[in-house]
Image: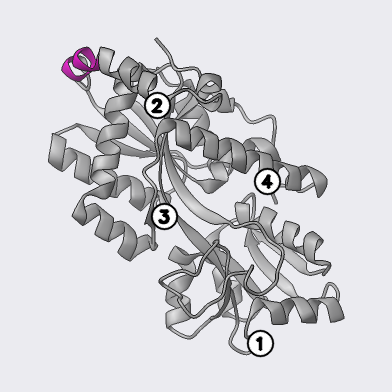
Amino acid sequence: MTIDRRAVLGGLAAAPFATTFAAKGALAQGAWPNKQIRIVVPFPPGGSTDPVARILQAKLTESLGWNMIVDNKPGGTGVVGAAFAAKAPADGYTWLIVFDNHILNPLFTPEVPYKDSELFNVTQIGRTPQAIGCHPDRSYKTFADVVADAKKRPGKLSFSVLAASQALVLVNQMQKDNGYDMNIIPYKGGGPLLADALAGHTDMAISSLTAITPHFRSGKLRPIAVTGDKRSPVLPDVPTLAELGVKAASSYSWWGVYVPTGTPPAVIERIHAEVVKATKSDDVLKKFVDQFNMEIIASSPAEFAAFQKREQDLWGKVIRDNNLKPE
C-alpha cells in the first residue's frame, strides 16, 4: 500500500492515517530494517546538510543499532542526489535529507530528472531564519538604511546571495515589492559568498544564521536584519524585516527527510517516529541548537507536505513573475 501525496495534501485526517500505519506496524517492525540504510545527502561534506544527517545517523545507530551510512551525492544544487533517491527502491532503505533549496529546484529548472511526486515527505526536522549582514566599513545600521540608500543610488549597492536558493528569490521579491534596485550577485557556494562579504567586495550578504553568526560575533560583519517572523534568540537586538517596514515574506532555512514514494506506510511511520525521537533527544537537540541555531519542527508527513506546497506556491510565483534563473 502506498500513501497518495494528493490525499495527504487534501486533508487526510490524522486518525485514519495513524490507524493505517498501526495496522502494518507489527509486520514492518519485525521485517524492517534488516539491512543497511542509506541516507543520501545531495551535497558534499561540509555545509549544514551533511552534519545534520551525520548527527541523526550517529544517534539512530547508537540507540537502535541500525546499520546506516551517509552517502554524499553532490551535483546540480542537490538535483543529482534527489534524483538518485527518487529512483531508488521504495523499501525504506534509502532516505534523502535536504536543505530548503530542494523544493525550489523544480521551480527554477522544470526539466529536473525526477518529479516531486516521486519523493514522500517524512518530516521537516527544523529551521533557522536567515540574516542579512554588511561589512563594518559600511554605514548601515539596519536594512531600512540600505533600502533608503538603494533608492537614492539605483543599482550601486551589491548584495551577495546563494544561487538557486530561497535567499535569491527573497531578495528579488523584496526589491520589487519595496521599489529599489540593487546589484544582486548569485554565488555557487556559501564559502565564496561570505569571503567576498568579509573582504568588503560586496556591500552586504544574506545567509543562514548557521553560517553567518560567527562573523557577527567576531565583528567582521554587522547584522542588519533577520528574515523570520520574530527576532532570533541568537540575535535578540537585530530587528526583523517587518519591524523595519520592509515588505517581505518570512523566510527560513530548513532541513527535511524524504523517502521514495511507495515506501510502505508502516515503514514510513517507523522512520518518522525514530527520527522525531532522535531529533528531540537531549544530546541531538543540543547539537542542533548549538551548531545550527535550529528551531526544531519535527512535523508530521501531512504537515511537511502542506508546508512544501505553500512554499512552492509562494516562491514559485516570485520566480515566474521575475523570470528568475537559478544563477
Please state which of the two labelled residues, at mark 2 or mark 3, is closer to the viewer: 2
Please state which of the two labelled residues, at mark 4 or mark 3, is closer to the viewer: 4
The disc at residue 315 is: 4
Task: Tell me the amino acid under the disc marked 1.
Answer: Arg
Assess whether mark 3 and mark 4 are in contact (beta carbons under 8 angstroms).
no
Q: Residue 186 location in percent, x, y? A: 68, 59
Q: In the rendered image, which quarter is residue 16 located in?
A: top left
Viewer-proximal residue among 110 and 230: 230
How many callouts does the rendering have? Answer: 4
- Please give the range of residues in magenta: 25-30
Q: Residue at label 1? A: 138
Give the dominant element type of the magenta stretch: helix, strand or loop. helix
User: Mark 3 Cα within 10 Å, few/some/many (few <14, many 20+)?
Assistant: some
Q: Residue at label 2? A: 14
Please state which of the two labelled residues, at mark 1 or mark 2, is closer to the viewer: 2
- Decide which of tag 3 and tag 1 comes sooner along the chain: 3
- In the image, is residue 29 part of the stretch drawn in magenta? yes
- Decide which of tag 4 and tag 1 comes sooner along the chain: 1
Q: Residue at label 3? A: 48
